[in-house]
Amino acid sequence: MDPYGSYGRSPPLPTRIESRDRDDYGRPPTEAYRDTRDRRRSPGELAVQMPQTRLSFNRLSFAARPRGGRGRSRSPAAIDRYQPDRLPRDDYYDSRAREDLNRDRRRSSPKPMPPSIDRYVPGQDPPTPIILTNPLPDPMKLEYQVGFNWFAEWWRKEQQIKEERDRQKNGGRRPERLKGERETREERENERAKIQAAYDLYKETLQKQMAQTFVRFHKSMDWFREKYVPEIRDPFRAKLCDFRRGLFGQWEQDLQAGTFDAFTLEGIYKSESNGAGGVVEKEEGETTAAAEVLGVGDLLPCKGGDLRDEVAQQPTLLVKTIAPTVSRERMEAFCKEHLGEHEGGFKWLSLSDPNPTKKCHRMGWIMLNPAPEGVAHEEGSDVRNDRDDRDGHVDDGEDGEEDGDAAMATEPASSLLTTAERALDKINAKTISDPDRGEFTVHCGIHRTPDVPRKKALWDLFSAPERIERDLHLATRIVAKLDEELGEDYNGLARIEQRVEELAGKGWLQPPIPATSIKKAKPEADEFEDGEDETMEEGEEAEDGAYDEETDDEELLIKKKRLDVMVEYLRRVYNFCFFCVFESDSVHELQRKCPGGHLRRPRASLTSAAKATAKASAYGEPFPLRRQESSVGEGDPTGSPVEERKFARPNSKSQQQLQRAYNWVKTFEEKLLQMLEPENIDLKKIGGKPMEEGVEEELNKFVKQEDEQKFRCKVPECTKLFKAHNFWRKHVEKRHTEWFEGIKADVKLLYTTGIAAFANTLFKVTLVNAYVLDPAHIA
């Protein structure tokens, strides 16, 4: 039964607990009930109920004592040990009172969170620690040159570390304001300019340091002195010119015989070749698509472009390795001693560049004089199996020994020996004796040229008319320079021009890849507008059809023919690759580095952006696409929409490829100019030192600074004292005129002949300059 009578009436709310009863919550419920009941009884009833034997006076007097106001609360539970973390007595009661108060409050605001709470609170993020150590190593401490992107990342980190150190030293906060798009772009351009300047300085300093280190370690080696010391280089160049005069005579005969009449450097894409040096037939208006990513093996030679040098087919022995202690003179004397100089004997010794990874060991080729083949050898003689001794398959040994040396085989007496095999029996495994440098055993094999030498494809920029004209100018200067060294009677440039004019007069100069002609359709009579007649407009050609701009005209065909024959002339006579900018002393060393030469890509595959890039490279202008993107923008009044519409903007991959091609062409021209104009080259940029600085460095050895304003003259028989260095320099020029003129004369002599008569410092400067001016120097 409902004690409240109905559901409409709410039960009575619980009364508030009095303060005097709060201490009863910590006691057992039975005791709390008993104490409450005892308090409501009178003292007499309490005394009667309690046994007399257990009731003492104190307990009775305490129980009978009237309780007025708030009674005494209970003490905390007794403990029999010391607790350091236990709250004091006052804190104990205060905490209990706060807990009771919070229990009674129905609504209250949350407590403030401590600052060390383990959760995300906005505005309380710790600052990001600044790393004051660059994780990237210093590029100057590396043994190689790093790229621009790598250097830029290191440079930005260095600037951040520098700014943070300055902020910690001087105080202040890092600026954290938002920047606009224009301000960000300008700041990025300024930063890139600073990085570029720092990168150029880094390259200049590193190249100078590497060049000086390389020269210091190798200046005493025979191969280095043969290339860069004039007093040793000039006699060898004279012998090389005698050898090249024979090659010139052979080339002149081939030129008159018409061997190069059909020769061309034009290439065909493998996908369009018909297998016979031509292209597959195309539909009307079909063009050639440029490859998305250009490769060096994309092309095949056109008909007439696959010529082989007959000199490379002559009998030759391959010396697998030559120690750097063996000089050219000692090697030539060894060959003449064992082979002789008669038919089938020694003709010419060619040595490769040293290999720095193999302790500067070199390879060698012993070229033999022609002799009748098929001579029977004596019974019991040995013949070396030379199948594995082909060019490009022989490793440079380090100690004169070769792994996998060819096995020896004995043939019957009736077999015939070739010229190379007879020479191999005479010279192989023989020893070169040197009392100063020790003995060296010569290991040889028969050299065989590759059956199909690989031709490398050039960048598409070389197919543009502007680029062909520029290359023709550079090739003409190279040929004239080398012909001058060969002698007045050897003028290959004049013979090439004469032969090309003869071919042009006969009408034999035709494009190797015929282009499809695009004819303009003649409009009908009813298609003319009012007032327009059938007469040609000004500037129109009166031909029935006109070729498009991808077709080579007669003038361009003549330029291409002259350039192609000059490039082949340089390879055959001077063993010089025009596009690699590399000169060797034989065709074998040339074919080891550049086996078959180079091919131009079809002109039809040039895009509009490639044509603009080729034009910029030929005229010495900066890369055009970068200028277009940076100059044409918002608020730029100089940006011309007409210039922007000349060609469509390429994608990032094509633009990067054009940038690489532009940089390659620029480096190619710089290497050629090092040969043609060494006096105009900035030596500091390539790691050298001007002779004027070398002279100053040598002159400073004759002055001593004794104090802040005291400079003592150390010129022989002079001990005068001067206040500043410039006064001492004037004193030298005025009072020691003969001595000063003698130094300048020695500098001129050193620069022209390389004879170091007085100064080791200037000799080192000359060696370093000669080394860095070599476009094909090893590092």
Image: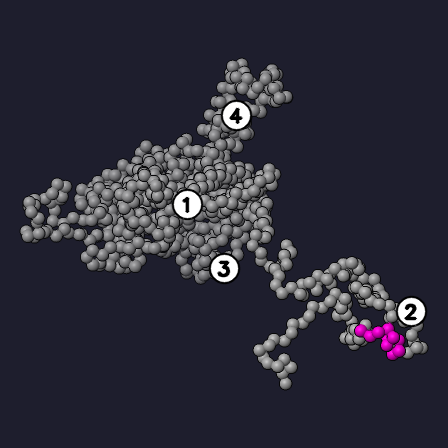
- Residue 58's tag is 2
C-beta proximity under 8 Å, tags 2 and 3: no
Using a 10 Å C-alpha cutoff, classify the residue at mark 2 as few (fewer than 14 neighbours), some (14 to 19) or many (20 or more): few
Which sits earlier in the primary sequence, circle 2 or circle 3?
A: 2
Which sits earlier in the primary sequence, circle 2 or circle 1?
A: 2
Q: Nearer the viewer, residue 705 or 683?
A: 705
The residue at 27%/49% (across/down) is 603
Q: Which residues are magenta?
A: 40-49
The residue at 78%/75% (across/down) is 33
Percent position (x, y) of residue 292? 34, 55
Which sits earlier in the primary sequence, circle 4 or circle 1?
A: 1
Dot in front, 3 or 1: 1
| Residue that mark 4 sits on | 696
Kind of residue at badge 1: Glu
Percent position (x, y) of residue 75? 81, 65
| Residue that mark 1 sits on | 181
Q: What whole-number distance in Å separates the C-alpha atoms at marks 2 and 3?
A: 127 Å
